[in-house]
Image: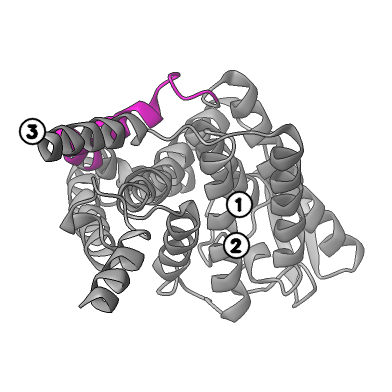
């Protein structure tokens, strides 16, 4: 009996007492999937009401495609308004130390810089050839907004919702970091042109943005890294983004072949060495956080302390 009790106590060390059944990995992933599907349906209804089904310009077509994910935002926010989920809303506000203009700009720099490096190397090795297509300030800004809606919606369901639910259930932040990254990669399996390197890269990209949420307390940073990553590929350089090709872009892809940092079907994300670049960026972020002693801003700490205090009071009564 003592051995059984010892085993139970050992298992309990992996879990936080404030976690619920819905916070276990399978339940969290299922709820995330349900939210995504509901959000897509709401978004499609909104976009169909805004745009005609025919006669769209290339700019309007790609705007409609990205903006169709807008329904994910209200669906996720409704879930976060549930009493037990309300602390998660804090991660969307400046109450988190890393939700600052500094990390918005750094996020843009990381996303644009990483993609530009891959594009430049691909051009130098003649894996791709680009030509200038045209620049319209109005559509440049509108499409950036639309890409933010899409990229931000993925960060909402992965680095906000499922990440924080797993942090409430499991003591180790590595569970939340790794699981949500794997789920994020799996979300891209149905994309056109998906390959092993592409899905692995998506998982590593999810790991990178999870580090920003975990070590730098910046969901804003994660959202803008993601936005810049997708926008730079698809709208700026005119390359496939997770297999999706934009009918409008600043530069136009004239020729493409497989290379170290490019795959003709999946784009930059399908290149066999892109994961090395993302790995180096992630390692640098982890190293800097460790060197500076950056600490996670655990939104569940107060809830856990109140629970333990109440539980101790009951036992002593």
Q: Is residue 230 visible?
A: no
Q: Secondary structure at mark 2?
A: helix
Q: Secondary structure at mark 1?
A: helix
Residue at mark 2 to residue at mark 1: CA–CA distance? 6 Å
Q: Are marks 2 and 1 in contact (CB under 8 Å)?
A: yes
* Residue under label 1: 208
Q: Which mark is on residue 289?
A: none
Crowd tier of the residue under label 3, counting other residues whose Cα lies within 10 Å: few below 14, some 14–19, many 20 or above: few
Question: Which image quadrant is residue 123 in?
Answer: bottom right
Task: Please state which of residues 115 and 7 is positioned toward the viewer in this rendering.
Answer: 7
* Tag nearer the camera, 3 or 1: 3
Image position of 254 (left or right of 229): right
Instruction: Give coordinates of residue 21: x percent, y percent.
Output: 17, 58
Quadrant for the N terminus, please.
Answer: bottom left
Q: Are marks 3 and 1 in contact (CB under 8 Å)?
A: no
Residue at 80%, 62% (x, y): give it.
Answer: 129
Residue 74 drawn above or below residue 253: above
Image position of 42 (left or right of 296): left
Q: Is residue 192 visible?
A: yes
* Residue under label 3: 317
* Residue under label 2: 204
Residue at mark 2 to residue at mark 3: CA–CA distance? 50 Å
Question: Which image quadrant is residue 301 in?
Answer: top left
Instruction: Give coordinates of residue 233: x percent, y percent.
Output: 64, 52
Magenta span of residues: 76-97
Residue 249 is one of the magenta-drawn residues: no
Crowd tier of the residue under label 1, counting other residues whose Cα lies within 10 Å: few below 14, some 14–19, many 20 or above: many
Task: Please state which of residues 309 and 115 is positioned toward the viewer in this rendering.
Answer: 309
């Amino acid at each position: 009996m003592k051995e059984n009790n010892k085993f139970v106590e050992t298992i309990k060390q992996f879990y936080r007492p404030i976690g619920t059944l819905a916070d276990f990995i399978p339940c969290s992933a299922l709820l995330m999937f349900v939210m995504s599907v509901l959000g897509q349906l709401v978004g499609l209804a909104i976009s169909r009401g805004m745009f005609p089904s025919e006669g769209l310009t290339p700019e309007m077509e790609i705007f409609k495609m990205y903006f169709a994910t807008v329904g994910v935002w209200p669906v996720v926010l409704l879930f976060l308004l549930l009493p037990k989920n309300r602390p998660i809303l804090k991660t969307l506000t400046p109450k988190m130390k890393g939700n600052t203009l500094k990390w918005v700009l750094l996020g843009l720099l990381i996303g644009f810089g990483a993609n530009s490096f891959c594009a430049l190397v691909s051009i130098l090795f003649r894996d791709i050839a680009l030509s200038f297509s045209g620049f319209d300030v109005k559509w440049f800004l509108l499409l950036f907004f639309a890409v933010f809606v899409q990229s931000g919606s993925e960060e909402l369901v992965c680095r906000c919702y499922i990440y924080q639910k797993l942090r409430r259930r499991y003591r180790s932040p590595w569970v939340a970091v790794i699981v949500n990254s794997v789920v994020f990669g799996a979300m891209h399996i149905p994309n056109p042109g998906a390959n092993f390197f592409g899905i692995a890269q998506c998982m590593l990209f999810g790991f990178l943005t999870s580090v920003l949420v975990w070590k730098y307390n910046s969901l804003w940073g994660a959202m803008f890294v993601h936005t810049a990553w997708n926008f730079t590929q698809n709208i700026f350089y005119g390359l496939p983004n997770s297999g999706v090709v934009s009918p409008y872009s600043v530069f136009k892809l004239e020729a493409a072949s497989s290379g170290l940092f490019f795959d003709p079907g999946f784009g930059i994300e399908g290149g066999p060495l892109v994961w090395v670049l993302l790995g180096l960026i992630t390692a640098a972020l982890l190293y800097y956080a460790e060197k500076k002693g950056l600490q996670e801003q655990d939104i569940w700490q107060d809830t856990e302390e109140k629970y333990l205090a109440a539980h101790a009071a009951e036992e002593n009564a």
